[in-house]
Amino acid sequence: MGLDIEANKKLVEEILEAYPDKTKKDRKKHFQINTEETKESCSCSLKSNVKSRPGVMTPRGCSYAGSKGVVWGPIKDMVHISHGPVGCGQYSWGTRRNYANGTLGIDNFTAMQITSDFSETDIVFGGDKKLEIICREIKEMFPLAKGISVQSECPIGLIGDDIEAVSKKMTKELEMPVVPVRCEGFRGVSQSLGHHIANDAIRDYVMGKAELAETGPYDVNIIGDYNIGGDAWASRILLEEMGLRVVAQWSGDGTLNELQVAHKAKLNLIHCHRSMNYMVTHMEQAYGIPYLEYNFFGPSKTYESLRAIAAKFDATIQENCEKVIAKYKPQMDAIIGKYRPRLEGKKVMLLIGGLRSRHTIGAYEDLGMEIVATGYEFAHKDDYERTFPDMKEGSIIMDDPTAYELEELAQKLNIDLMGSGVKEKYVYHKMGIPFRQMHSWDYSGPYHGFDGFKIFAKDMDMTVNNPVWSLFDKKAKVQPEGASV
Ligand code: SF4
């Protein structure tokens, strides 16, 4: 059954009433209510990937976060320099749970904070000389590091430093790749341009620079899985059980070598379309490697994806695929049997980055939960086009929603669960609304694949049905009609 289209339209309009006229007009374009027509045509008029309004508390980050935080940071055997003042590197230090095997500081540098720690003299006289010194120090201190990336923070692009020239010189001198990345936070409107810039840096400085010792017909790459809480590992085992060989994981638990040899695979499997579509499109054009989008959230989507992947190969892989599904289905049915009665009909609202706001819907629905509203921080039109068909009629779809809009919606829709980020979490706790972090998995996970679904279901139940919520009078927290905002 669908949701009430007219009531939700009115609800959004009421919430936007609090803004000055110009803001109201603008923010209205970032909301759309799903209808039969938008579901079927996959087309939307929703405005996305444009600058946030000043002063409205956007949930967005910057280009540096998209490049260093998301794409490059997880490459474990390279040292990533946060180039600029101390803040960006410090605040992004160890906060994203991109798991990686290895020994920290020896052959794995993911959970370290390496920065050029700009001072005033570096701003005035430039930081290129300092960058050279740091690269040499890295080579000396971390002899097993396979390469360096230079992740630019805001001032680098403003003061005219030539990090490309330094990187070229250092690549030669240190005999390993030093990759300049122009991901200054003022570029673009969100993390999204950082992904694109980071993809282009992989293409220009790393891709195709090594050869695979041997290739096979079942070689695939996992593209756009950052191994949050072990997600990529929980995905990889299924592909391998099916008989495929995973050549590269981009970039969770990934290595420089995996970036360099990925062009030898037969098929690119892309999980996060938003952050790495540039790469798979390029690999298709330059190396003729086809790509396939897949979704390993929840059993329904995982079965569907495994079959779609197997269909790209021969009968052996297709038979193996059915065996894998037959092996895990009873386990998945048991999980659904246990948790669905406890979660059936619960209303969920989501606000995540550029993928999970649509990708996790199937997993919630496997548990009988209903997504009444979903939104992205930095999605583009093609992401929304993929979202409308997956959402129920009458559900609310929103772009770059402000803290105020989300809080109002959560209360007025009387949701049973909010899934978003750490900035949001404690606000909702205080409102008496169960909340799960859908970036960090609330320090749990993995959530991908069959192993992941067991944890996902347990986590949702643990949160939604936690006895603590009965201590709140949730209704009392709902803003009284006509109250000023
Ligand atoms: S906007 Fe600039 S200063 Fe802020 S985190 Fe991003 S790179 Fe750093």
Image (cartoon, rainbow, N blue to C red):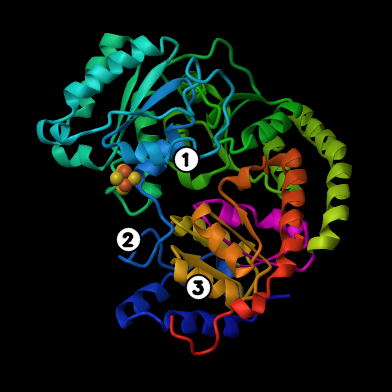
Amino acid type, residue under disc 2 in the picture: Lys
Question: Of 264 and 122, which appears nearest the observer?
Answer: 122
Magenta segment boundaries in residue numbering = 344-372
What's the residue at 35%, 26% (across, down)?
Answer: 149
**Residue 400 shows in this picture:** yes
Identify the secondary structure beneath mark 3. Answer: strand
Amino acid type, residue under disc 1 in the picture: Met
Left or right of residue 387: residue 128 = left
The disc, 1 or 3, on the residue closer to the chain's N-terminal end is: 3
Task: Return the x and y of residue 299 as percentages of the image width and height.
Answer: 76, 47
Crowd band around label 2 with a 10 angstrom C-alpha radius: few (<14), some (14–19), many (20+): few
Q: CA distance from mark 2 to mark 1?
A: 21 Å
Left or right of residue 177: residue 455 = right
- Location of the N terminus by quadrant is bottom right
The residue wearing badge 2 is 51
Task: State ligand 1's quadrant.
Answer: top left
Task: Return the x and y of residue 118 as percentages of the image width and height.
Answer: 23, 33
Residue 269: which quarter of the image? top right
Amino acid type, residue under disc 3 in the picture: Gln
Please tell me whether residue 419 is drawn above or below residue 185 in the rendered image: below
What's the residue at 71%, 40% (across, down)?
Answer: 449
Seen as rendered, the residue at the extreme front is: 471
The residue wearing badge 3 is 32
The residue wearing badge 1 is 276
Q: Is the CB of mark 1 within 8 Å of ligand 1?
A: no
Crowd band around label 3 with a 10 angstrom C-alpha radius: few (<14), some (14–19), many (20+): many
Seen as rendered, the residue at the extreme left is: 125
